[in-house]
């Protein structure tokens, strides 16, 4: 990740596309990136979200990024658990573009 580059990961298991992961560099704070992932509902609860998050964290560790953030729906307990288990801490609950949100962060 260099010079405002975003990284996207199409995630497949047994040749089936099951979701996406991303690292998006913060243009204002170049040592910070947002981690995100999304799985199709039929693949929830199978450990893929954890696997994607771990891959993206390892990727970020090989860059100049020093801090990762993630934004989730506070009602999404499984996603929150994935992030907390990977060392993220909750910074705040807030409204984001009219929707409930929780911002989490991890120092690398």
Image (spheres, rainbow, N blue to C red):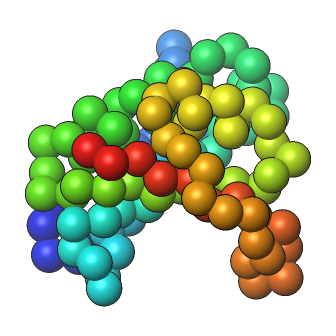
Residue depicted at 56% across the width and 53% down the height: 104
Instruction: Locate residue 68 relative to residue 74 in the image: left or right.
Output: left
Q: Position of residue 3 (x, y in %)?
A: 14, 75
Q: Position of residue 14 (x, y in %)?
A: 51, 14
Compared with 48, 89 (above or below) is: below
Instruction: Locate residue 15 relative to residue 80 in the image: left or right.
Output: left
Picture quadrant of residue 89: top right
Specify the quadrant that holds the N terminus. Answer: bottom left
Specify the quadrant that holds the C terminus. Answer: top left
Q: Position of residue 37 (x, y in %)?
A: 56, 46
Compared with 83, 103 (above or below) is: below
| Residue situated in front as seen by the camera: 51 or 8 | 51
Residue depicted at 75% across the width and 19% down the height: 45
Residue 78 seen in render: yes
Residue depicted at 72% across the width and 25% down the height: 43
Q: Position of residue 73 (x, y in %)?
A: 78, 55
């Amino acid at each position: 990740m260099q010079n405002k580059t975003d990284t996207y990961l199409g995630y497949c298991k047994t040749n089936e596309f099951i979701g996406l992961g991303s690292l998006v560099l913060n243009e204002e704070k170049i040592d910070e990136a947002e981690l995100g992932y999304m799985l199709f509902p039929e693949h929830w609860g199978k450990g893929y979200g954890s696997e994607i998050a771990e891959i993206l964290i390892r990727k970020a560790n090989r860059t100049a990024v020093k801090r990762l953030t993630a934004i989730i729906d506070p009602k999404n307990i499984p996603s929150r658990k994935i992030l907390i288990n990977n060392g993220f801490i909750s910074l705040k609950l807030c409204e984001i573009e009219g929707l409930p949100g929780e911002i989490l962060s991890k120092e690398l």
